[in-house]
Amino acid sequence: TFWVWLEAILDLIKKHILPLWIDGYVMGFVSKEKERILLKDKTPGTFLLRFSESNLGGITFTWVDQLENGEVTFHSVEPYNKGRLAALPFADILRDYKVIMADNVPENPLKYLYPDIPKDKAFGKHYSCQPNEGWAPFLYLPLLESSFKAKRQLKEFGERKKGAANVFLPHFYSVDLA
């Protein structure tokens, strides 16, 4: 029911994203349709944070991109829930999120928090540590395609980057490439 969904969202806010919520960085209660309307005319890399409509107590982010032919595309990640956010703060996920681009180079597609706030300006004070403070680097790969293709990409990435990093898949599988 609606009340169960709302209670799960309130629990998520209270336990995992309260500072981001207080700062006004979580758009929150926005439909997928409204999200696309808001993002369609924005600079590629602009993203927003909203609560999942279908995943109980989940928060997701979507960013806008533009193809070479000018076509606007939207990319969303599978919602993060309190179980996943207990392992890694959401601000750190946003800072370190990466996708493998066409040229096989990991890149963070998240540049500006809607409407146009540079990501690090918005979330910098919420990062739990700076990337080179002794923490193992993580690479985030969205599993938006088939598992077979993702595993193949992961294997190819590991062969190129022997010993380089740990890989964290949004479905919460961690693979050590060392």
Image (tube, rainbow, N blue to C red):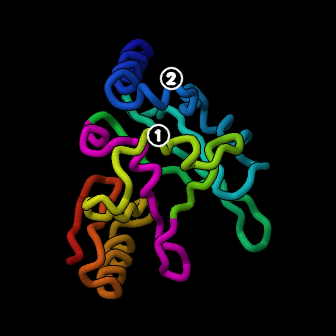
Q: Quadrant of residue 80?
A: top left
Check residue 147 for magenta coloring: no
Residue placed under numbered mark 2 in the picture: 22
Quarter holding the N terminus is top left
Write the start and end of the magenta stretch as one range: 83-107
Q: Are marks 1 and 2 in contact (CB under 8 Å)?
A: no
Location of residue 164 in the rendering, given as x and y in whole percent from the top left corner:
29, 77
Front tag of 1 and 2: 1
Which residue is painted at 35% across and 54% down in the image? 170
Near-viewer residue (128 or 91)? 128
Quarter holding the C terminus is bottom left
Please, what is the three-letter code of the amino acid marked with disc 1? Answer: Lys
Disc 1 to disc 2, how far (Cα)?
Answer: 13 Å
Q: Quadrant of residue 131?
A: bottom left
Which residue is painted at 44% across and 64% down in the image? 145
Please, what is the three-letter code of the amino acid marked with disc 2? Answer: Ile
Please determine whether, in this image, residue 116 is positioned above or below residue 138.
Answer: above
Which residue is painted at 30% across and 58% down in the image? 133
Near-viewer residue (27 or 136)? 136
Location of residue 70 in the rendering, given as x and y in whole percent from the top left corner:
79, 66
